Image (cartoon, rainbow, N blue to C red):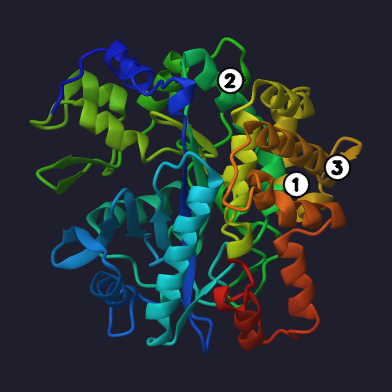
């Protein structure tokens, strides 16, 4: 445990994440909704056909190793650099290895999905390519028996109307990218934050909840706007050209703490009046004093659209069908790992005021690619962004065994955006049309097993 006494100690945490370009990698985290194949209801964590049982079968059949248990409950697995963890509503997440190319990530993800389908079959479970569980209400979904979440869950109810939905019902895709310096980190942070409305529009995939349409293309995006204003959303200071690690540190210092971990035990910090990390570092909490490990844990409880750790993490995209899961890391790698492309992406969004950014972002949740930024649709801007990303990936020349570069992971997304349809729009059309409001048809049509994806 490394004590921290000054703000400079915290800033150095971010500085220590800088890497030379030759060591830049891409990490992807894939959250997936598991449901009963017959009813579309969320698979619980516990029970003979629950997610914990499937996790134990991953150990027996596929060489995963138990990594995290609390009170006898299995909560995480590892195999090499990859981890499988469980989200609060038993959504299944793969945190992949740090890959040099998207081809590497594709191989790992494909194997993971095949293994989950294998163990799910015997339990009548399937994975859906949606960003939100479509049928079960939050009071019907078991909360994962993880101490962290049992601190967060009641706190969410005090901070916003939709935070408990976020925990139990939603699933997203996250991409993690490296930086070489403070200036490089903040440049990437600014651009990644700037394109958030375009990512919501392109990856909108949560139009169904509680058994019916919810009037949004990305209801998950709307949920984040009413979860906890202290730690969510788009950060205004990110758009200042002078922003640095100190600005992010100042922000994070004033985010209320959830907990402190000592000897694998969670100490609840959420009871009124609560405590910020700034106050904790100054006065302590009971007998505990702030450490660098506490700071690292605290940073994981910040849920802004893009967040800073020892890398840049984009958290915006709804979970996707498997054929589109690699599109987010491919998009961001193409943009953020090429100087011309990062400038081109910024040119698309740099003229918006902060008020306009928030308005456009909210519009993207409801209308997806049809939302507008002034006279321009997000469809048009997204097409330009995808062209920029494709250029960046082509220049990086990371080839698979067939000689294909990483632009192949953008092809399906590019086709959809050109046609003006997000996954949400396709799902809405099918729900009203050939699925005829039938949950069984919804499950069959959005199941991973229905996808020609590998």
Q: Earlier in the sequence, mark 2 or mark 3?
A: 2
At numbered mark 2, what does the secondary structure look like: helix, strand or loop? Answer: helix
Q: Nearer the viewer, residue 92 or 145?
A: 92
For marks 1 and 3, give the CA distance: 15 Å
At numbered mark 3, what does the secondary structure look like: helix, strand or loop? Answer: helix
At numbered mark 1, what does the secondary structure look like: helix, strand or loop? Answer: helix
Q: Is 370 above or below relative to 312? A: below
**Labels 1, 3: front one:** 3
Identified at 69% across, 36% down, the residue is 394
Q: Nearer the viewer, residue 392 or 92?
A: 392
Q: Which residue is mark 1?
A: 363
Q: Would residue 264 appear left or right of 436 to someone viewing this image?
A: left
For marks 2 and 1, give the CA distance: 25 Å
The reply to whether callout 2 and callout 3 are in contact (CB within 8 Å) is: no
Q: Is 342 above or below relative to 159? A: above
Q: Which residue is mark 2?
A: 187
Q: Is 161 above or below relative to 242? A: below
């Amino acid at each position: 445990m490394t004590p921290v006494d000054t703000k400079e100690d915290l800033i150095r945490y971010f500085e220590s994440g800088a890497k030379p370009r030759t060591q830049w990698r891409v990490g992807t985290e894939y959250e997936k909704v598991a449901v009963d194949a017959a009813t579309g209801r969320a698979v619980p964590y516990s029970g003979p056909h629950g997610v914990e049982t499937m996790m134990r079968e991953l150990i027996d059949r596929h060489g995963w190793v138990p990594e995290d248990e609390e009170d006898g409950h299995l909560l995480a697995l590892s195999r090499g650099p990859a981890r499988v963890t469980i989200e609060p509503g038993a959504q299944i997440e793969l945190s992949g290895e740090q890959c040099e190319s998207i081809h590497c990530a594709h191989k790992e993800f494909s194997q993971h999905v095949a293994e989950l389908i294998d163990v799910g079959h015997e339990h009548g479970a399937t994975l859906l390519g949606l960003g939100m569980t479509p049928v079960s209400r939050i009071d019907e979904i078991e909360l994962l028996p993880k101490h962290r979440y049992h601190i967060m869950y009641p706190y969410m109810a005090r901070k916003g109307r939709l935070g408990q939905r976020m925990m139990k019902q939603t699933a997203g895709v996250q991409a993690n990218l490296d930086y070489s310096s403070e200036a490089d980190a903040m440049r990437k942070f600014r651009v990644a934050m700037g394109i958030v409305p375009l990512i919501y529009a392109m990856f909108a995939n949560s139009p169904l909840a509680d058994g019916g349409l919810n009037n949004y293309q990305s209801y998950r995006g709307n949920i984040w706007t009413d979860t906890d204003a202290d730690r969510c959303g788009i950060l205004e200071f990110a758009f200042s050209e002078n922003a640095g690690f100190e600005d992010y540190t100042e922000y994070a210092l004033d985010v209320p703490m959830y907990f402190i971990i000592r000897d694998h035990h969670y100490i609840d910090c959420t009871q009124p009046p609560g405590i910020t990390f700034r106050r904790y570092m100054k006065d302590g909490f009971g007998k505990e004093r702030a450490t660098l490990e506490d700071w690292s844990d605290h940073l994981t409880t910040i849920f802004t659209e893009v967040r800073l750790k020892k890398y840049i993490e984009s958290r915006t995209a709804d979970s996707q069908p498997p054929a589109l899961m690699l599109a987010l890391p491919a998009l961001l790698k193409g943009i953020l790992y090429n100087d011309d492309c990062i400038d081109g992406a910024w040119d698309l969004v740099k003229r918006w005021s902060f008020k306009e950014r928030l308005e456009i972002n909210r519009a993207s949740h409801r209308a997806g690619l049809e939302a507008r930024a002034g006279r321009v649709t997000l469809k048009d801007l997204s097409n330009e962004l995808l062209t920029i990303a494709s250029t960046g990936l082509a220049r990086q020349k990371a080839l698979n065994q067939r000689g294909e570069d990483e632009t192949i992971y953008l092809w399906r997304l590019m086709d959809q955006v050109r046609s003006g349809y997000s996954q949400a729009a396709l799902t809405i059309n099918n729900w009203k049309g050939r699925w005829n409001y039938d949950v069984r048809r919804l499950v069959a049509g959005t199941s991973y097993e229905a996808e020609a994806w590998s």
